Image (cartoon, helix red, strand yellow):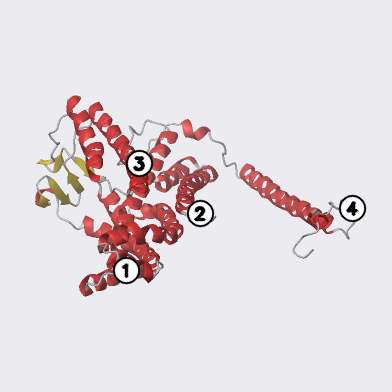
Amino acid sequence: MSGVTDPRLLRKAPPRPLRLSWADERFRNIIWQVLVVGAVIAVLYWLWSNTRYNLEVRRIATGWDFLWREAGLPIGESLIEYDPSMSYFRALQVGVLNTLKVAIIGIVLATILGTLLGVARLSKNWMLNKFAAAYVEIVRDLPLLLQLLFWYALLQGLPGPRQAFNPIEGVFLSNRGLKVPFFVWESAHSWALLTFVAGIAATIFYRRWARAKQYQDGEIRAIWPAALAFVIGAPLAVWAALGAPFTPDVPALRGFNFRGGIDVSPEFFALLLGLTLYTAGFIAEIVRAGIQAVSQGQWEAAEALGLPRSRVMNLIVLPQAMRVIIPPMTSQFLNITKNSSLAVAIGYQDIVSIANTTLNQTGQAIEGIAIIMLVYLTISLSISLFMNWYNKRIALVER
C-alpha cells in the first residue's frame, strides 16, 4: 500500500566489528589520534625537561616558596590591608583586586557610554548623530596606549592641590588625582549595601511576576514603585535603623594635600578613562549594528499600534537586538580586561606591574609569568561563562 513504510527499513544497521587492519577506516582514525596525542605529549615533555635542565645549569631557583617571603614592595593603592612587611602572596592579591577593580568598573561604564553612543548613531538629530559618528571614528583609530599616555599626561599637567579645580562642592581635581566626598564606612553601611543588592534581586523577581500576571489578565502593572521601595527605600531604612552616619566625609585642603573623602589616583583615573572611552567606541558600533539588524517592519508594526518610540525601543527592538549584540560584546568585555595590562605604562599597580616587580626581585620569572597568565585566564573564562549563559538564556527557543 502506498504511504506505508516497511518497518524493516527503520531498523538500524548492525555495528560493524572493528578490524585490526589499515583498510578499516575506524582503525586508521584511532591510530592517527594515538600518534597525534603521543607527539603532543613528547613535545611537552621535551620542553619541560629542557627548561628544567637549563634552569639547573644557570642555577636559577624554581618553586613557589618565594610567595611566603617578605615582599618589601610598596603599593600605592589597595582594596585590602597591605604593608611592605607582608608576603609576596599578599602583594599579588592586591594586584589581582586592582585589576578586577579596573575591569569591572570599566565594563560597566563602557557598556553604558557605548550603548548611548550606539543609539545616538541612529538618532534623527543631525548634530547628535554626527557627534557620535565622529567620536567613534576618532577614538577607534587611535592606539589605546597613546590614549592612556595622553590622559595620564593631561592629569599630571593639572595644577596642584592649592589651585585644584572645584567644579562641585566637595569635589577637587588636581595633579594628585580626584577627591570626592565619601562616607566613613561602618558595619551599618555594609548592611545597607547588602539590602540594596537584595532589593535589586527582589525587583527582578517582582518584574517577572508582573509580566506573568500581565500574560494572564492583560493588566499592566507599574514596576517603578516596587523598584523604588526595594532598591532605595529598604536600604535607607536599614541605614537609619542601624544608626549609620548620613554626614559625608568631605575632602578639605590641609597643608599641601587634601584630607578626607575618597581618593582616586591619577594612574587609576587615567587608566579607567582611557579604557572606557576607547572600548565605548567599539561597543557603540556593536549596539548600532544590533539595532539595525531588527527588521524595519518591527518598528512600523509597533508604531501602528500607537506605542511611543521609547517603548518600542525598550520592549520590542532591544530584546531582539540583544541576541545580535551579546556575542561581540563578550569580546569587548574580554578586551577591557586584557587591555588593563597596559596599566604598567602609566604606573598603575595591577597584577602585571606587581608580578613583574616580584619576578625582578626574586628571579622567579617562570612562576611570575605563570601567575599573570593564570589570573587573566581565570578572569577571561569567568566573563565568557557568564556571557555565554546569558546569551543562551535570551536565545530564541525553536520548537
List x then y, in percent, for residue 324: 44, 61
N-term mark: 3 or 1: 1
Q: Rounded to the nearest whole Å, what is the CA distance between mark 4 and mark 3?
A: 60 Å
Q: Which residue is mark 1?
A: 136
List x then y, in percent, for residue 48: 66, 46
For the view shown, which residue lies furthest in the top direction?
Answer: 242
Q: Rounded to the nearest whole Å, what is the CA distance between mark 2 and mark 1?
A: 34 Å
Q: Which residue is mark 2?
A: 397
* Three-letter amino acid code of the residue under disc 2: Val
Q: Rounded to the nearest whole Å, what is the CA distance between mark 4 and mark 2?
A: 43 Å
* Three-letter amino acid code of the residue under disc 1: Val
Which numbered tag is attached to residue 19?
4
Image marks 2 and 1: residues in contact by CB distance under 8 Å: no
Q: Rounded to the nearest whole Å, what is the CA distance between mark 3 and mark 1?
A: 40 Å
List x then y, in percent, for residue 94: 38, 38
List x then y, in percent, for residue 314: 31, 57
Which numbered tag is attached to residue 209?
3
Q: Regarding mark 2 in the picture, which secondary structure is present there?
A: loop
In which quadrant is the C terminus drawn?
bottom right
Question: Marks 4 and 3: which is nearer the front?
Answer: 3
Q: Residues within 10 Å of mark 4 (few under 14, many from 20)?
A: few
Q: Residues within 10 Å of mark 3 (few under 14, many from 20)?
A: few
N-term mark: 4 or 3: 4
* Circle count: 4
Image marks 3 and 1: residues in contact by CB distance under 8 Å: no
* Three-letter amino acid code of the residue under disc 4: Arg
User: For the point 27% across and 36% down, which residue is it?
Assistant: 196
Observer-nearest of 137 and 322: 322
Answer yes or no: is residue 149 visible: no
Image marks 3 and 2: residues in contact by CB distance under 8 Å: no
In which quadrant is the N terminus drawn?
bottom right
N-term mark: 4 or 1: 4
